[in-house]
Image: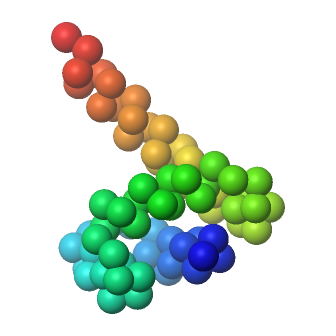
């Protein structure tokens, strides 16, 4: 499944409503579940070895989103 997820992310680099539809059609799961799985996958050595540039980009995007969320909640 790692390769499938990484292939999909290369085809759909940005989030959109159409990406949500594509996730449901290709994987048969809700987008929230897809992103939970993807976030676990990009932390694996296998993913990093398969597609290092893509995995690093996805990690940066995830980490930036988490940092932004922490900033918003730190009042």
Lateral position of residue 57 relative to residue 63, left or right = right
Q: Is residue 16 above or below residue 48?
A: below
Query: Which residue of the protein is positioned furthest toward the bottom in this rendering?
Result: 25
The C terminus lies in which quarter of the figure? top left
In the depicted view, which residue is nearer to us: 35 or 8? 35
Residue 45 image offset from top left, x and y in percent: 76, 54
Residue at 55 percent of width and 53 percent of height = 40
Lateral position of residue 1 relative to residue 31, left or right = right
Residue 59 image offset from top left, x and y in percent: 56, 47
Q: How many marks?
A: 0
The N terminus lies in which quarter of the figure? bottom right
Residue at 33 percent of width and 75 percent of height = 29
Q: Is residue 37 visible?
A: yes
Residue 12 image offset from top left, x and y in percent: 44, 75
Residue at 40 percent of width and 60 percent of height = 35
Picture quadrant of residue 55: bottom right
């Amino acid at each position: 499944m790692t390769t499938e997820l990484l292939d999909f992310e290369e085809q759909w680099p940005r989030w959109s409503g159409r990406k949500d539809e594509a996730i449901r059609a290709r994987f048969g799961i809700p987008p929230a579940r897809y992103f939970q799985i993807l976030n676990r996958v990009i932390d694996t050595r296998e993913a990093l070895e398969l597609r290092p540039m893509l995995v690093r980009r996805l990690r940066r995007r995830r980490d930036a989103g988490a940092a932004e969320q922490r900033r918003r909640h730190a009042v």
